[in-house]
Amino acid sequence: MTTSWTVVRVLRDRTAGLYLTGLVVSAFGTSSLWLVSGVWVKDLTGSDGLAALCMVAMWAPTLAGPALGTLADRLPRKPLLITLNLGLAAMLLTLFTVDSPGRLWLLFTVLFLYGTAGVVHDAAESALVAAAVAPDLLGDFNGLRMTVTEGMKLVAPLTGAGLYAVSGGPAVACLDAVTFVLAAGLCALLRVREERPARSGGGRRKQTAEGFRHLWGHPVLRPLVRAGGTTMLLTALCGAMLYAVVDRLGHGPAYTGVLYAVQGAGSVAVGLVSGPALRRLGERRFAAAGIALTGVAVAARAVPSDPVALMSSAASGLGLPCVLIAAFTAVQRETSGPLLGRATATAHTLVFTPNVLGLALGAGLVELAGPGLLLPLYGLALLLTAASLAQRADSAARTAARSPSDANPA
């Protein structure tokens, strides 16, 4: 099946088309606010540290993913998504009062709640998509989701920055609020037959832990989630060296925007081919191939050459999303509906928390050694991760191919 026909097939599915349209709208607003929030704080305070806290505020709720995911399993998911979108729209309007450093606490509070709602939203959306989209289209849908998200990161920040320059931060918050209202309307149009929320036994702590136990006890999901977390850790260590790489190339810090744009273009491209690639290779081989490509790209970035740096950024953009698409598609396929919200939120925590830790650790390591030494080591570690995952895939394939008499010669 060609990539173009796969895209058409997904978009012809009414539910998938509505989901992707809503994602385009909300991702545009989110990407706009993501950039502007830091600029807003920087303009009001002049502090780089406070500006960086904006991203910390939005990412911090990911640590509570397993607990937040229980909401997506205890409540009807379509009404939950509509409520979250409308609640975020109303909350963003409070940012019109942020006009001085003394009111920045409100901005940070909104960003923290924004991130919290995002964790619940992603968990509920993943479960609802798994119930509404045909199983053989899940890989294609998740690939297109990656394409849409990364595509908005290329377009929306420039729009947000321009609107901020003309009208200030409140105007960008208003734009984001409008996108959430539109997303809520699109979600209301969905025709989805949901299962009744399950009430599992035990206390809330036990219910929260069920998502982790499912992921870590599942022979397919555990290697994928572990490889995803390892990959995000290593690429975050590499990302912390980006300014040092740019400095070796003889460019100013603004050149990082060029490298990010090239990487984003690679991520857009891989999202279009991920569905057919998943069907041909399977989740583990697809993820292993992407990790290996990322490892080669990371090691190549140690070469102080502009063409090599651009090619390595494009290769990273192509390779890194593979393990994410493979892992989260597998979670949707291998998890029952009543547990899928908690499993998705827990997978997000296990995969993306190492990213935060890697950025912090990498900022310290870059002061001790340069890109010429560390980047090849990070690349080698990624290649070993890919090899381990591919070996597990081959072992699983051989086990599945064995007959009952082979498994029990006696």
Image: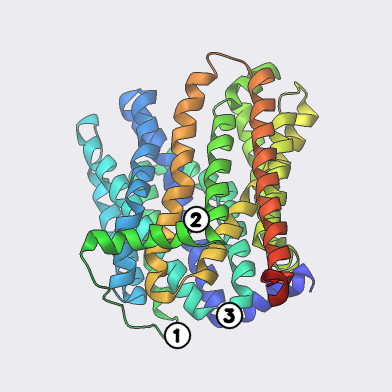
**Quick check: can you spot residue 78?**
yes
Q: Are marks 3 and 2 in contact (CB under 8 Å)?
A: no
Residue 237: name its quadrant: top right
Of the 4 image quadrants, the one containing the C terminus is: bottom right
**Quick check: can you spot residue 124?**
no
Q: Earlier in the sequence, mark 2 or mark 1?
A: 2
SS label for mark 2? helix
The residue singled out by tag 1 in the image is 191
User: From mark 3 to mark 2, how far is it between C-alphas?
Assistant: 26 Å
Going 50% across and 74% down the picture, which residue do you hit? Answer: 130
Residue 30: image tag: none
User: From mark 2 to mark 1, how far is it between C-alphas?
Assistant: 24 Å
> In this rendering, is residue 18 above or below 375?
below
**Label total for image:** 3
| Amino acid, disc 1 | Arg
Q: Is residue 65 left or right of residue 223?
A: left
Of the 4 image quadrants, the one containing the N terminus is: bottom right
Q: Is residue 337 left or right of residue 296?
A: left
> In this rendering, is residue 250 above or below 180?
above
The residue singled out by tag 2 in the image is 28
Residue 34: name its quadrant: top left
Please name whichever residue, 73 or 243, is drawn nearer the observer in this view of the structure: 73
The residue singled out by tag 3 in the image is 134
Going 73% across and 64% down the picture, which residue do you hit? Answer: 398
| Amino acid, disc 3 | Ala
SS label for mark 3? loop
Name the residue furthest front: 410
